[in-house]
Amino acid sequence: MMRYFFSFLFCVVAGLAYGQRQGVLATSEFRITGDIAKERTVIIADIMKYPQVELGDISIKNHRGEEKVKARHVKGVLLMQLLDSAGGIQAEKPKELSEYYFVFTASDGYKNVYSWNEIYNSPVGKQLYIVTGQDGKDIKDMDGRIQVLSLGDYNTGRRYLKGLAVVEVRRAR
């Protein structure tokens, strides 16, 4: 009887471990929603209309600063350009912009948050990309497809998001 229990337990644990290796559901589009002039859906063809920047080889580090992945030959499009394509935030006064933030959500529910000031008023925004190619693959063949990468972070893995599904613009009140 115990042998069957341990066999069953092994199968359950193995199944869970296998499920974790499946990765994030790849996305071919993402929505920009919330407190923005015009909500829109961005597809891969839209992303590819913007200038791509050669980012070189990038070390993806965990929260302890340990390298977990070495992405090679990375190319990207500045995310700020895509956000601007939704018409921008319609704040009545410029100082209100500091009250806004962006919630990036992946297809598996993983979330990252950036403030308006981070993206538009600091060096982070000039280093925040949608990855359009890496390791010899273009965006259509990459794991998770639509990926967000912040090169302005010390430990890039914390906000390295695969399978971008939604960018929601919110106002802190």
Image (spheres, rainbow, N blue to C red):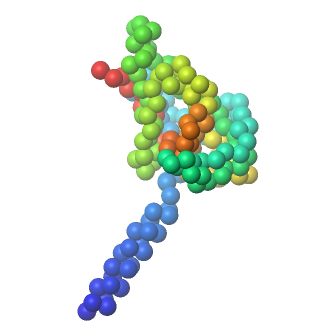
Quadrant position of residue 58: top right
Viewer can see residue 70:
yes
Viewer can see residue 35:
no
Question: How many numbered tags mark residues here?
Answer: 0
Percent coordinates x, y for residue 6 in the rendering: 33, 84
Residue at the far top in the pictured view: 93
Q: Is residue 29 above or below residue 26?
A: above
Q: Is residue 129 above or below residue 80?
A: below
- Say left or right for 171 vs 59: left
Q: What residue is shown at x 66% (from left), y 37% (from top)?
A: 76
Q: What residue is shown at x 56% (from left), y 51% (from top)?
A: 66
Q: Is residue 123 above or below residue 75?
A: above
The foreground one among 151 and 136 is: 151
Percent coordinates x, y for residue 136 in the rendering: 74, 52
Specify the quadrant that holds the C terminus. top left
Residue at the far left in the pictured view: 1
- Say left or right for 120 vs 104: right
Q: What residue is shown at x 74% (from left), y 37% (from top)?
A: 54
Q: Is residue 24 above or below residue 49?
A: below
The foreground one among 109 and 126 is: 126
Percent coordinates x, y for residue 85 in the rendering: 56, 24
The foreground one among 38 and 10 is: 10
Specify the quadrant that holds the N terminus. bottom left
